[in-house]
Each structure stands twice: as structure tokens, then as C-alpha cells.
């Protein structure tokens, strides 16, 4: 039996996410926006809670299209507050609309959001070599810098812990344990494009 990180446990959706997405370098702007949204909603909750509602979030936030989300108005926010399929938190919903507008500004300035966000790790994934889950940090110097810069650009729900979770999801850091089969598989994908 292949060795894996222990955190997905026996939850099939978590296992699938761990085995196919987590830690894989991601440069596609729409997918990066998706993780920005999902990680903001995760604040104070477990990732499995968010993952199990992912398809509902996808429908609610127009397939995570930042252009469409940036145009959301008060009636859209009311609709989302009534949507039992997602996390109905007014602050997080309003932050998502605000973040979509800030995201589009970053795209205009840098050409892509990916170019901007990957600059925090020098455009190369940080290949960590953790042996136990307890060694994996919840923030880093890079996530501190990212958080500060995103806030300065008008983003909300982008504290350093959320930024670090985003970096893990987007493959900006390889935090698979060295004993996990995915650590070796993810490592050579450094410059790869994940759609």
C-alpha cells in the first residue's frame, strides 16, 4: 500500500483532492481565483467542509469567473445569503465580490494574477521536506508578505494563514510529507501548468 499524507483520512473527496490537486503548481487565473474564494470561506472552518460544498460554491459564484463575481450587486448578495449549499457568511460573501474587483485590477497591472502571485516564491515552488504533519507550518515569510501586499491592494480575508493554505493548494509550496507518494510526483512539476 502506498504511503500518503494522513490528513485526508478515509474521506473519498479529501483523498481525491490530495492525490490530484493539492501541491500541484497552478498558474490558471480562474483556478487561482477559485482557491482564493474557497480559502477565504475556509477561515475558521475545516477544509473538508469547504471541499464538500465546492460544487455549490462553483454554481453560486458563476464558475469562479472573477469578471462575473465583480459585477455582483446587493440582490446577488441576498441570494447567496439564502443559499443553503454554501457558507452563508455576509462578511465572506461581500469579501468575495470585493476580492474579485481587486483580482481584476491585479490582472490589469501584471497581465495575469498568476504572474503576480507566483512572484512571492520567485516563480518556483518551495520544495519542503517535512517528515511529520506537526512540522508543517501554518504561515511563512512568503505568506506574510503576500498577505500584506494583498491587503494593500484591497483584498479581504487574506491573513497569513489563509495565504499559506492558498500557497499549498496552488502548489506554491510542496507540503506533502517526504514519505507521501505525491511528494516525488509533485516535485518535477515546478514549471508545469495546471489547468
Image (spheres, grey):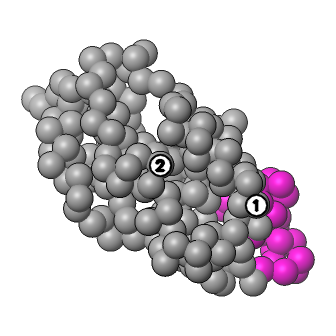
Give the alpha-carbon distance from disc 2 to disc 1, as whole Å: 17 Å
In the picture of the structure, the residue carrying the numbered disc 2 is 120
Q: Is residue 161 visible?
A: yes
State the residue lying farthest toward the left: 1
87 sits to left or right of 82: left
User: Considering the numbered disc 1 on the image, is that residue within a helix, a strand or a loop?
Assistant: loop
From the top left corner, tell me how far across and down residue 137 is, in percent: 48, 24
Left or right: where 32 falls relative to 183: right
Looking at the image, which residue is at 87% across and 72% down? Answer: 78
User: Residue 85: where, in percent of width, then height?
Assistant: 66, 61
**In magenta segment, residue 70:** no
Please name the residue shown 27% across and 36% down the image: 127
Residue 60 makes an appearance in the image: no
In the picture of the structure, the residue carrying the numbered disc 1 is 154
> Measured from the top left, where is residue 153 in percent x and y?
71, 60
Does residue 31 lie above or below 126 as drawn?
Answer: below
Give the percent coordinates (x, y) of residue 2: 12, 31
**Total numbered labels:** 2
Element class at badge 2: helix
In terms of image quadrants, where is residue 128?
A: top left
Q: Does residue 78 show up magenta in the picture?
A: yes
Q: Residue at x 21, y 30 (%)?
A: 180
Q: Would you say the residues marked 2 and 1 are in contact, meaning their CB atoms lie under 8 Å apart?
A: no
Identify the main secondary structure in magenta: helix
Q: Quadrant of the N terminus?
A: top left
In this picture, residue 15 sits left or right of residue 91: left
Give the magenta part as a residue range.
Answer: 72-97
Of residues 52 and 97, which is closer to you in this image? 97
**Which of 64/186 is in front?**
186
First in sequence: mark 2 or mark 1?
2
Amino acid at each position: 500500500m502506498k504511503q500518503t499524507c494522513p490528513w485526508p483520512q478515509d474521506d473519498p473527496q479529501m483523498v481525491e483532492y490530495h492525490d490530484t490537486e493539492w501541491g500541484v503548481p497552478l498558474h490558471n487565473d480562474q483556478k487561482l481565483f477559485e482557491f482564493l474564494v474557497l480559502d477565504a470561506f475556509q477561515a475558521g472552518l475545516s477544509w473538508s467542509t469547504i471541499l464538500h460544498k465546492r460544487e455549490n460554491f462553483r454554481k453560486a459564484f458563476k464558475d469562479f469567473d472573477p469578471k462575473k463575481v465583480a459585477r455582483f450587486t446587493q440582490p446577488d448578495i441576498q441570494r447567496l445569503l439564502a443559499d443553503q449549499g454554501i457558507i452563508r457568511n455576509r462578511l465572506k460573501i461581500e469579501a468575495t465580490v470585493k476580492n474579485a474587483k481587486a483580482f481584476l485590477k491585479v490582472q490589469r497591472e501584471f497581465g495575469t494574477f498568476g504572474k503576480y502571485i507566483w512572484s512571492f516564491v520567485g516563480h518556483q515552488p518551495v520544495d519542503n521536506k517535512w517528515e511529520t504533519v506537526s512540522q508543517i507550518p501554518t504561515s511563512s515569510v512568503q505568506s506574510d508578505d503576500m498577505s500584506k501586499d494583498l491587503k494593500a491592494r484591497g483584498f479581504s480575508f487574506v491573513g497569513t494563514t489563509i495565504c499559506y493554505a492558498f500557497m499549498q493548494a496552488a502548489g506554491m509550496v510542496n507540503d506533502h510529507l517526504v514519505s507521501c507518494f505525491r511528494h516525488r510526483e509533485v516535485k518535477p512539476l515546478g514549471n508545469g501548468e495546471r489547468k
